[in-house]
Image (tube, grey):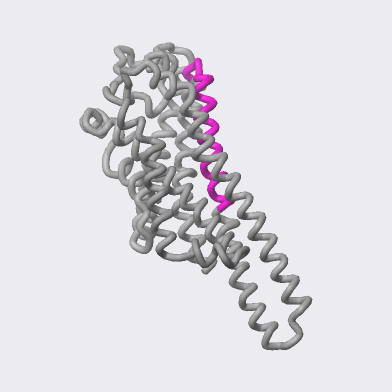
């Protein structure tokens, strides 16, 4: 990945003052949102076990990122990269399975009895874990040597997060990671899940709409109306939860994800642009980590 290193490291003096100001602001944003959401995330994790929240909040909160990577990276480099993608895949595919489960529960009778059970949920969760492991196992296999980028010049402009990274000695994997993995990641982590979620969303909305029509068109007795209204309220509550969750994922994830892909293929060439990107990424990451916190709040407030 040495070509990648050359693209991301600069020693030019152009617009260095602007770069330094923007990057300093970005470095202030990280501790602010990490401390804030470690508090919120800790309270929430008392009620729900979510490894992804704890993992991402705890690392930036307990120690300085560069110090952590400098001394621990030789032992944990590949595992940090692996678990980052591994836990993110588990999160999004669990949301997908929740949508499928609720969709089947509301729209079918035979599949509902077969799939919408605790035992089936445990099996599906295990399948998701195995799937996420296999999809990201290449990091454990091919990432070998941690690289620390040093600069003799004090006026060096660099994207945050690229002072230390893992390098593979396999040229084919380097090419895969640089040119193929970003697209591969978008397809499995974003496009396919969102497509499935959108289909389930349409089916659920259609079912709720038809249920409302049946209640008002065919219920004549007062007791039936009350019973039907209660059932419809429950369906609406489930629908609201899934609508909010389905909107939460693309809004918090897509901007940063596609921006990272753009940077990967079109890296910045000036210090000013690097500083702007550092600032944008610091805000984008904070937004993307909010999703788990608000996912819980959505479940809580919608019943």
Q: Is residue 282 magenta?
A: no
- Give the camera-side residue of 41 and 47: 47
Q: Residue 39: x, y in percent?
A: 36, 54
Residue appearing at x 42%, y 65% in the figure:
118
Q: Residue 222: x, y in percent?
A: 71, 88
Residue appearing at x 25%, y 33% in the figure:
76
- Above or below residue 189? Residue 155 is above
Q: Is residue 266 magenta?
A: yes
- Can the viewer see residue 74 in this picture? yes
- Give the camera-side residue of 115 and 65: 115
- Give the camera-side residue of 30 and 229: 229
Q: Residue furthest bottom?
A: 222
Span colored in magenta:
246-271
Task: Give the prevailing secondary structure in the magenta stretch.
Answer: helix
Q: Quadrant of residue 200?
A: bottom right
Q: Residue 290: x, y in percent?
A: 46, 49
- Can the viewer see residue 251 in this picture? no
Residue appearing at x 50%, y 57% in the figure:
98
Q: Residue 48: x, y in percent?
A: 38, 60
């Amino acid at each position: 990945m040495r070509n990648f290193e050359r693209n991301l490291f600069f020693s030019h003096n152009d617009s260095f003052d602007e770069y330094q100001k923007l990057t300093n602001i970005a470095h202030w944003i990280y501790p602010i949102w990490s401390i804030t959401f470690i508090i919120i995330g800790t309270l929430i994790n008392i009620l729900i076990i979510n490894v992804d929240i704890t993992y991402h909040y705890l690392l930036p909160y307990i120690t300085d990122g560069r110090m952590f990577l400098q001394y621990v990276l030789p032992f944990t480099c590949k595992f940090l990269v692996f678990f980052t993608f591994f836990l993110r895949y588990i999160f999004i595919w669990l949301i997908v399975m929740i949508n499928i489960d609720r969709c089947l529960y509301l729209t079918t009778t035979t599949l509902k009895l077969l799939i919408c059970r605790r035992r089936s949920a445990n099996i599906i969760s295990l399948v998701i874990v195995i799937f996420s492991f296999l999809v990201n196992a290449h990091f454990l296999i091919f990432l070998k040597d941690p690289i620390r980028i040093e600069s003799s010049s004090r006026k060096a402009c660099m994207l945050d997060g690229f002072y230390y990274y893992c390098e593979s000695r396999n040229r084919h994997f380097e090419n895969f990671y640089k040119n193929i993995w970003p697209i591969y990641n978008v397809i499995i982590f974003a496009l396919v899940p969102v497509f499935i979620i959108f289909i389930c969303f349409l089916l659920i909305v259609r079912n709720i709409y038809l249920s409302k029509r049946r209640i008002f068109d065919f219920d004549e007795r007062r007791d039936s109306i009350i019973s039907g209204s209660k059932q419809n309220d429950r369906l609406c509550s489930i629908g609201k939860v899934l609508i909010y969750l389905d909107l939460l994922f693309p809004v918090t994830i897509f901007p940063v994800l596609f921006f990272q892909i753009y940077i990967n293929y079109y890296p910045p060439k000036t210090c000013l642009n690097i500083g702007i990107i550092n600032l944008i990424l610091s805000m984008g990451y904070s937004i993307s980590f909010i999703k788990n916190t608000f996912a819980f709040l959505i479940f809580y407030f919608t019943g």
